[in-house]
Image (cartoon, helix red, strand yellow):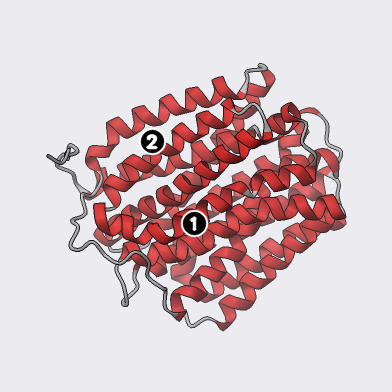
Amino acid sequence: MEATLPTYNFTKRTLRIAVGVMFFMTGLCFASWASRIATIQQDLGLSDAALGGVLFATPVGLMASLPFSGWIITKIGSRKLLIAALIVYACCLVTLGLAQNTFQLIICLAFFGFSSNAVNISVNTQAVAAEELYQKPILASFHGLWSLAGFAGAGIGTFMIGKQIIPLHHFSIIFALIIIAVAVTSGYLKNDKVTSSGPVFVLPDNSLIKLGIIAFCSMICEGAMFDWSVIYFKKVVFAQGAWMGAGYTAFMLTMAGGRFIADWFAHRFGLKRTLQLSGMLTATGLILAVVFPYIYTAMAGFLLVGFGVSSVVPLVYSAAGKSKTMSAGVALAAVSTIGFMGFLVGPPIIGFIAGLASLRASFTLIAAMGICVTVFATKAKI
């Protein structure tokens, strides 16, 4: 007999709260790992180039999930997938703290990437369902909660580092928080009915591919900021003590704030103009931090990057969820997988370029991705 999950009576408000909690927990899980990358790099004695190679295991895990993502969500529904995938995601976080050598870390990161894709697809499918109930743009606000979680995760990570608490204990605490959150809110998620098993893999149409490319370019920049901003401030800006996290904090602050106004801005000025402006802000901020690698100028640059990347992904996902050629879950699986690949590929690319040239050179290349967002948004029919 198939096990069933409890479902409670809910209103659109309780659904929005439940989905918001899931977004927050997802962001907290990833930010907890990101906040301890420098610690784990030091503990395992990894160079920047070696760290870049290790981080590449995460997109490899995501790629492994690609053939199954659309099929899984049509088979069991986004609610069941989100509950299961988020628990696995949290378990994988703990294993990252258990890794004692480079090989173990690579294996754990591959599973971390695999589960992250399933979480990303299912939580955004739930968000699209909530947006349909409200009949107005609200998806960016969910991503704002993800960003706030990243901000909180960075603060918790800074506290843990200051108290010399090892990553394993840090990650175990986050795991417990996620399990509690899932247990409390899972019954209020939308129990989407499965109408068919669906194909193993669905090729997206041209409009979805274009949306995916825009998300890909923006998320390369976003992933780079998550994994390398602290290291950039340490090795390029030569920040000391708490100032090493100033750039990351500045980025997270404006990214979170930008997502809470993105829906209103896009409604007022249009999706195309919003995406064009986003790409320009991202490129300008990164170039500013590269040309003037000093604490205040680099912070100002990272503030612009935060504003720039804040609206791209939620607006692209919202557009994908309204696809007329396939279901919201399958469309999101296609677009989010393309986009999230950029989030995971960006950090290792920076590591490789830093090993060959410098971190400033790698951040210059990432700035080009911001320009690509503007170019592709201009050409896309959106």
Give yes or no for contact between labels 1 and 2 (Cβ–Cβ under 8 Å): no
Provide the secondary structure element on which disc 1 rests. helix
Q: Residue at x 65, y 57 (%)?
A: 221
Asked whether the viewer can see residue 270, the reply is no
Given the image, on which type of amino acid does mark 1 rest? Ile
Q: Which residue is mark 1?
A: 261
Relative to 365, residue 109 above or below:
above
Q: Is residue 43 left or right of residue 111?
A: right
Q: Is residue 32 left or right of residue 134?
A: right
Q: Residues within 10 Å of mark 2 (few under 14, many from 20)?
A: some
User: Residue 317 in the image: x percent, y percent?
Assistant: 43, 63
The CA span between labels 1 and 2 is: 30 Å
User: Residue 372 in the image: x percent, y percent?
Assistant: 66, 72
Residue 248 image-quadrant placement = top right
Label located before the other in sequence (1 or 2): 2
Given the image, on which type of amino acid does mark 2 rest? Ile
Q: How many labels were placed on the picture?
A: 2
Q: Residue at x 83, y 36 (%)?
A: 239
User: Residue 363 in the image: x percent, y percent?
Assistant: 77, 56
